[in-house]
Structure formats: structure tokens, C-alpha cells
Image: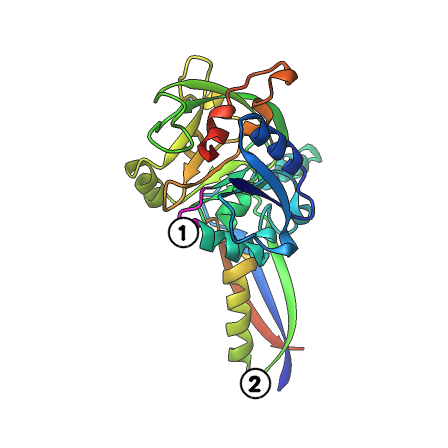
Amino acid sequence: MTTYTATVTVRLKRGVLDPEAETTKRALERLGFELDALRSADQFEVDLDAESAEAAADRADEMAERLLANPTIHDYDVEVAEA
Amino acid sequence: MTVAVVTFGGSNCDRDAVRALSHVGVDAERVWHEDGLPSDVDGVVLPGGFSYGDYLRAGAMAAHSPIMNDVRDAAEDGVPVLGVCNGAQIGCESKLTPGAFTTNASARFQCESVHLRVENADTPWTAAYQEGDVIEIPIAHGEGRFEIGEERYDDLVAEDRVLFRYCDADGNIIEKANPNGSRGNVAGILGDRETVAVMMPHPERASLPDLGRSVDGQGVLSAFV
């Protein structure tokens, strides 16, 4: 068994309104920054022991599918590295 | 008959639901989620509140509480299940109902009285109304914007599973009357079977005459009679 860190990034699907990101963008503009768009995402770092990087990724993928993301509104990706 | 009002850590409309149900003649009691659902319940209410502090997403944690397996089994047996506000978020997160309720377009918590148009009066939840009726019920939520993919939305409409839409006082479904940016102004929907429903507005807060406000919510609760 090897210890891995799986990084799960959950973001709203393109086209789904993100009111918090819109509000943050406006606040940045008020501070004088120039920007075209801003997207927010949640990131989860999961430490876990697995037989292989692939097995770790599969487990993290299932975590995203069942809880960390809501497939109705979210896309997600999983990256695995040895801890 | 007894309706179980499921209390999660952070539920805060459970007592209101019991009182409102009692007022319309339905025997109801609160059930702590860790105790599981009594086997002989005749109905289930998932009440409003902030279960698990809305961690991750509103309703996401409660949706995976073991009692939701009991609720799903009961729903499959035809037991009526109603999710209100946080209960509606739990309903969608647990896939009892399609779609998701997410952050209001305003990015603010909104607490106000709204008008709803009854879209389908041929369900247990709306049998007390006529199609096209305009009723007044309060909302109180920060994550009530109904989102669903376009195809699934079209299916929902085609299958006549939209119960209520936000409208103005005259029943017009317009953007200005949409308090949270919900797709199609949708405020309440049916699950796979018509005995399962979720809605963001609070019928239990519009049921007791003593409050001196609308009692239009009684019709929804009378589905349990």
C-alpha cells in the first residue's frame, strides 16, 4: 500500500450561474482590478492508502460522484500524487 | 394516522410543521433522524432548517443520513413524503426528486412572502386548489434557485411534475416575480411518483390563522389527511 493525496476539484458546470463568483468579481472591480471573468471552485485534498495511483483515483472519483459534487450542477476532476 | 417530521441536527421548522399539521387535523410527531423511521408511519415531512450547518451544500449531509434509506423505502411503498425548504434541498440531494436547489441569483438570503401559481392541481399536494390558482406562502432561503439540465427540465414539464411556479399577484410567471432565479420560476416539483414532493416555500408558515397572515399553505399539508 502507498499513501496518496487525491485532489478533487469541484466546479459549477459551464453555463450554471455562480452568484458568489459574480459578487467577488464585482468586488475586485471595485478595488480597481481589470478582469474578464471569475470562476470559483471547491478543492478537497484526500489522503488515502491504496494499491496503486489508479485505485486511489477510482476511490476519489466515487467520493466526488456520491458526495463531494452534485452531478446536476457540477463537473469535477481528480488528480492523484504520492503523499 | 401519524406523520413523522424528521429532525436532523440543525432542523428548525420541525415544531412548526407538527403544529401546522395538527391544525389541519393530521397527527404528527417529530422523529430524531438517528432513531430511524417508525415502521408504521403514514407520511413523512423533511422540514426546513440548516441541517449540518449547510456544510458542503445545503442538504448534502442529511441526504446521506441513514434515515434517508428508510424514507426512500417508505416513498417506494407509496407513503407520502414532503420536503420543505431545507427538506427540499435534502430531497434533491438524496435523489428523491430531480434537479438541485442552489445559491439564489441575488447571492443573498431571502425571507419574504411570495405568490405561487398552481401548475398541476391533479396531485395530492395540490388537490385543494384549482389549476391556475394564485396562493401566497413565505420563502426563507439562501439556496433556493432550482437548477436542472435543459432536457430534464423539458421532461419535468412534459410529465406535468411542476407543482408551483413563482408568479406575481395576478398569476403572471415573470422574471420580476422570481425571487431566486429558479429555472422556469419553479418553486415545487414532484418526484418519480406523485406522492413525493419538494418545495422551497413554507406551507407550514402559512397555515395557522393566529399568525394573521395567509393560510394558503393548509392545502399542501392536507395531502396527509
Asked if marks 2 and 1 fall on the same chain, the answer is no
Residue at mark 1: chain: B
Which amino acid type is shown beneath numbered disc 1?
Asp
Q: Position of residue A16 (x, y in %)?
A: 47, 43
Q: Is residue B177 visible?
A: yes
Q: Position of residue B216 (x, y in %)?
A: 50, 20
Left or right of residue B190, residue B103 in this image = right
Q: Residue at x 58, y 47 (%)?
A: B59
Mark 2, other Cα within 10 Å: few <14 / some 14–19 / many ≥20: few
Left or right of residue B51, residue B81 in this image = left
Which amino acid type is shown beneath numbered disc 2?
Glu
Q: Nearer the viewer, mark 2 or mark 1?
A: 1
Q: Which residue is mark 1?
A: B77
Q: Is residue B122 above or below residue B11?
A: above
Q: Residue at x 42, y 12 (%)?
A: B170
> Where on the picture, by quarter, is residue A5?
bottom right
> Where on the picture, by quarter, is residue A49?
bottom right
Tell me if residue B76 is in the magenta stretch.
yes
A27 or B45: which is nearer to us? Answer: B45
Label at residue A51: 2
- Tell me how many marks there are: 2
Q: Secondary structure at mark 1?
A: loop
**Residue interval drawn in magenta:** B75-80
Q: Residue at x 62, y 59 (%)?
A: A43
Q: Position of residue A47 (x, y in %)?
A: 66, 72
Residue at mark 2: chain: A
Q: Position of residue B197 (x, y in %)?
A: 44, 39
> Where on the picture, by quarter, is residue B108?
top right
Q: Secondary structure at mark 2?
A: loop
A26 or A68: which is nearer to us? Answer: A68
Mark 1, other Cα within 10 Å: few <14 / some 14–19 / many ≥20: few
Tell me if residue B3 is in the magenta stretch.
no
